[in-house]
Each structure stands twice: as structure tokens, then as C-alpha cells.
Amino acid sequence: MKIGIVCYPTFGGSGVVATELGLELSKRGHEIHFITYSQPVRLELLSKNVHFHEVHVPEYPLFLYQPYELALSSKLVDMVKLHDIELLHVHYAIPHAYAAYMAQQMLKEEGIRVPIVTTLHGTDITLVGSHPFYKPAVTFSINKSDAVTSVSDSLKQDTLRLFNIKKNIHVVPNFIDLEKHSHDFTDCQRGMMANEDERIITHISNFRDVKRIPDVVKVFYNIQKELPAKLMMVGEGPEKEAAERLAEDLGIAERVVFLGNSNEIDRILCFSDLFLLPSQTESFGLAALEAMASGVPVISTNTGGLPEVNEDGYSGYLSDVNAIKDMSANAVKILSDKTTLDKFKANAKAQSQKFDLHTIVPMYENIYEETLKKFMVH
Ligand code: GMT
């Protein structure tokens, strides 16, 4: 099948999922065309089955805001025609589902028909999409998609609650390439990061408000009072500076390492003992799944889709948002003796197997086939 994938090319989870999906589909014989404003960060190699088409938005001083949706929908029209793309899979409703619908209508005028599959990722629904400014356009583009998927059941329920949706929403969880994370608890050069007796705690995100970055630092502050530990903060974003200041104010700056954005997430996770994700809301928590696939137990909140990913008392622990004491106590429970830590590490790895890409990617293939079949009949 020739599939056009539209996504955000950045470090965010939706772009990562879209890229990993495209790469796996290409291995399974599909021809994949990524259409976005820059090459997705996890897309290192282009090949005969993997193409990248850049959406260029010419700067024009007349416009206060450059019209990306317009440029994207025109590019989609051109690429569908040039490469005979059979289906468009758009990740993140805003503005991708909207632009894809416009492209579909333009193509229809020329007698070319292409169905749209829209995947909802979270913030496009819970934080941004439900804002009154966007709600009518988001509702419209979801209802006009030929198939809709969401990355967790929790996000599906949120979507149905917040919007007037007339479409069936298929839950297709995010997935993980277990082979990429198959380093089986070796040393992973952890000596470069910490002393032998120190536990390594890791947080990875885009440091937005919703990730509750101060809670990461506060939980770590409590942990390091109980046992020797280091905190690895991976990512960039608006809350990073405040977190650096908080670490200084708490007198733990030398125990907290800010690593910035990284393309070596598996190497960092390989030497990690525990992952912290105290988010306010999280439709899925791909970063937690990546940690578990590397055998790293997760201390997270119990909001959104997190309970579908992290099993309380097995792969880690779940707590209420803002329950700093509870999260700290759970972390210490896991970290304080080697037998418990090893058990949680093994459980985390086992839990991640539920999200093996070999199980999940065929779910998307089935949706593509069904959608194409139905679309051609109508
Ligand atoms: O979490 C973010 O800030 C990034 C955001 C995105 O759109 O890339 O992540 C969302 O999609 C990910 C992939 O499906 C999910 O794993 C994240 O949980 C979700 N983020 C939120 O719901 C806050």
C-alpha cells in the first residue's frame, strides 16, 4: 500500500509514534511518504520504501501568521497525485486532520479519491482541541475522517465526552520495538554517570507545564534523602530553567544532570533504575513505555491512559497527581533493595511486551484495509 503520513516532526510522542509506524510499515513492504515541515527526528534513513516530502511555507510579510494548513493541504494534493498515494494517515488532529480533509476535497474535484485515517494523541483533544477556538474545526475534521483511532481507551472516552463525535473510535495503543531495547540489564557504561552505589532516576519529556517538572525534582529530593541517587533530566522545554533553579534551591544541583534533547534514549534508559512521570495528564505516556521496554520501572500518576500502560504494584506504581510523598515512598520501596529492584525491572520489561510493535502495527494495517474497502464502495 502507498501511505502518506502526516505528523509533527519533533521530539513529541505523536511524531515518534508516527515515525516508528512508518518505518515498520516500510519493512512490511508498504511505500511510506512522510509529509511534514522538516524531517522527523527519529527518521534517520530514507530508503526505496521511505520518502520524505517537506512542506515549505513561504514567508510573506503581509501575513501575521503563515498559513501552514494551506501549504500542507496543497502539498498533500501534489504528493497524492505524484506518488499515487492510496491512503493518508494523519497524526494529531490539529491542523493535520483539517488539512487532509481539504486535500481530499480538492482531489475529489479531479476524480481522485483518497481516504483519511486520523490518530488522536492527547493534547490535540484534551488541552488544545477542546478550547472553544478550535472545537468546531476539530469536531468537524474528526467526523470527516474515514477512520479514527486513539492511543488509549481513556483518550477515546475523553474525546467522546468533549466533542460531538459521530464516528467509531478504534483504540490502537502505542507500541514499542522491543529489539531496540534488548540490552538485558548490562552495565551500559553507567559508571560514566554515577558511582557504583548510586541509583539512577530518569525523567524524559518536553518539559511542558503538563509534565509537572517541579514534582520530578521534589520526588527526587525525597528519594536522595533515603539512598544515594542521581537524577537524569532529558529533554528541553519551557519548565527546564525553573527546574534547574529548584534543584539549586533544594541544594541538590550536583545530583541532577540536565542532558537536553537526545537521540540516544535507549542508552540513557539502559543505565536507569527508575523512571519518573508525575504528569497532570497523559493520554498514553510513550516515554513510560520506552522506559519499561528497557527494563526500567515507572513511578507515575494515575491520570489519563497511564493505568493502561503502567500496572500498579507490578511494573511500577501509580499515584494521584501532586501526591509527592506517595510517589517518593513508592520509589524508595522499589529502589532500596536489589531483589525488589530486579523484580520490578523484570516486570516492567514483561509489561512492555503487551505493546510489541509486531502485535500493534497489524492493527493499523487492518484499519487501512477496512477503510479502503469501505471507501471504495461508497
Ligand atoms: O506529551 C506531550 O507533550 C507530547 C504529546 C504529543 O502530541 O506528541 O504526547 C501525546 O502523545 C503521545 C503519543 O501518543 C502520548 O504518549 C502522550 O501521552 C501524549 N501527551 C499527553 O497526553 C499530554
Image (tube, rainbow, N blue to C red):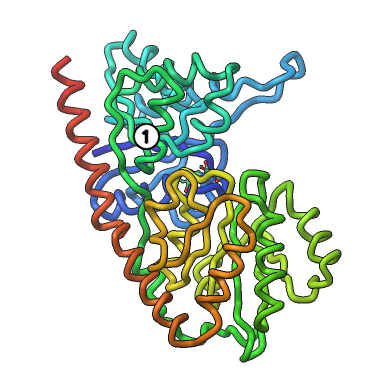
Q: Residue 238's x, y, as percent?
A: 73, 46
SS category of the residue bearing label 1: helix
Residue 193 visible in the current orientation? no
**Where is residue 241, by image quadrant?**
bottom right
Q: Is 80 left, or right, of 10 in this rendering?
A: left
Residue 276 visible in the current orientation? yes
Q: In this view, does 223 lie above or below 85?
A: below
Point out the residue furthest to the top here.
109
Q: In this view, does 361 lie above or below 100?
A: below
Q: Is 71 left, or right, of 81 in this rendering?
A: right
Q: Is residue 240 above or below residue 75?
A: below
Q: Residue 336's x, y, as percent?
A: 55, 83
**Where is residue 359, by image quadrant?**
bottom left
Tell me how many marks there are. 1
Under mark 1, the amino acid is: Lys
> What residue sits 66% from the left and 46% below the top?
208
Q: Which of 306 and 320 is in front in this view?
A: 320
Tell me the quarter of the image containing the N terminus.
top left
> What residue sits 23% from the left and 36% below the top?
367
Q: Residue 277's x, y, as percent?
A: 56, 57
Q: Name the residue under label 1.
A: 156
Q: In this view, does 263 lie above or below 189?
A: above
Q: Residue 258's x, y, as percent?
A: 72, 65
Q: Nearer the viewer, residue 243 or 17?
A: 243
Tell me the quarter of the image containing the C terminus.
top left
Point out the residue furthest to the bottom here.
196
Q: Nearer the viewer, residue 327 or 23?
A: 327
